[in-house]
Image: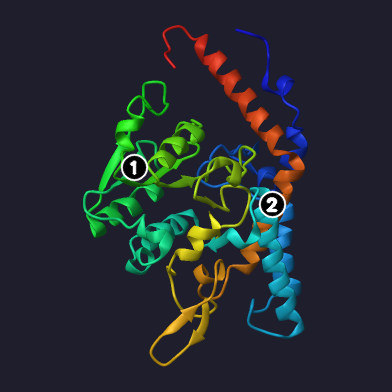
Amino acid sequence: MTSRTPSSVTALDVTRIKADFPLLQRTIRDGKRLVYLDSGATSQKPSSVLDAERRFYEMHNAAVHRGAHHLGEEATDAYEGARETIARFIGAQAGDIVFTKNATEAINLVAYSLGNASFSDTAVGQSLSLQPGDRIVVTEMEHHANLIPWQELCRRTGAELAWLGVDDEGRLDLSTLDQIINDRTKVVAFTHQSNVLGTINPVAEIVARARAVKALVVLDACQSAPHMPLDVVELGVDFVAFSGHKMLGPTGIGVLWGRTEVLAAMPPFLTGGSMIETVYMDHATYTDPPQRFEAGTPVAAQAVGLAAACDYLTTVGMDKVFDHEHALTSYALEGLASISGLRV
């Protein structure tokens, strides 16, 4: 086995970074320093994120988009400024960023809208309206958040669910890609990076096939957003969903990015305050995205915290994060390969 160690192949100052996380300074079990290895489920938060959220409550807390008073203006500016920061982090325009409570809600928002009759009445929706016999494609790698909403949409519309399998190496089996994503396919939903295996899926190849049959592409980026540079426009997909709590941000906030023209055609998922244009006695008209999909009191403090997390990751450098994790993975695989009788 090589004598190389992870610290010798990474540009990250791990000791300095750990010092930014108050929780990682804890000691447990006979005074041992806490080591946290469950960031795939939820991440810890650096001081800058904790401070940003607390500062919002201490200095700027007010109703967003509802008051003309000084604090109301400050709160609205902080909320929309956070949207702009998060948009830059993923290479998007702020108007295409929808705040949700988590990635699960973001994916449900898309699934609900695609099955809504009012969507099929739009020019965009006419070609995407799901009918019995149409197909939604997922993969065997999916988190339940990117599976159950599509199962439910199939149940409501009569569409069928088809699967891309996983091979013995933990990669998607693309040998049947053209057969699985066929001419009846309306939606292809898959994870960018597996939360179980860490596999990074070939987005470009899958998107190319989806485009050939004019299917929408929904990408679960919960694991990739914190671990690699992400440019949603370059990815060429229609929707990207991710959560704040897995990328050093607060709980209670997720993000849906969508292509402008598709978002504009979609009906709201939830209705109520903040998302209406005009209310009449017997009906209402709805405002444009992203506010159309942000009914009720928005997650303002959480958005500010997530923006701080994006700033923190940007300062660390997403290229460095990716290279560091690649080095750790290579080190682990080399070590495991040196163990006689162990198959990886």
At x 25%, y 55%, the residue is 131
Query: In which image quadrant can residue 30 be found?
Result: top right
**Side of 70 relative to 124 (left or right):** right
Q: In this view, does 81 lie above or below 166?
A: below
At x 44%, y 64%, the residue is 266
Query: In which image quadrant can residue 139 be found?
Result: top left
Mark 1, residue position: 137
Query: In which image quadrant can residue 267 be found?
Result: bottom left
Q: Where is residue 199 in the image (x, y as percent from the top left)?
A: 48, 30
At x 71%, y 40%, the residue is 18
Mark 2, residue position: 88
Is residue 103 among the parts visible in the rendering? yes
**What amino acid type is highlighted by mark number 2?**
Arg
Badge 2: residue crowd in 10 Å (few <14, some 14–19, many ≥20): some
Q: Which colour scheme is used?
A: rainbow
Q: Where is residue 294 in the image (x, y as percent from the top left)?
A: 53, 70
Q: Is mark 2 on a helix, strand or loop?
A: helix
Q: Position of residue 12 (x, y in %)?
A: 74, 32
Badge 1: residue crowd in 10 Å (few <14, some 14–19, many ≥20): many
Give how far apart the Cα atoms at labels 2 and 1 are: 30 Å
The disc at residue 150 is: none
The outermost residue toward the bottom is 281
Q: Is mark 1 on a helix, strand or loop?
A: strand
* Image quarter in which the N terminus is found: top right
Is residue 143 among the parts visible in the rendering? no
**What amino acid type is highlighted by mark number 1?**
Val
Number of marks drawn:
2
Q: Nearer the viewer, residue 123 or 19?
A: 123
At x 48%, y 46%, the residue is 220
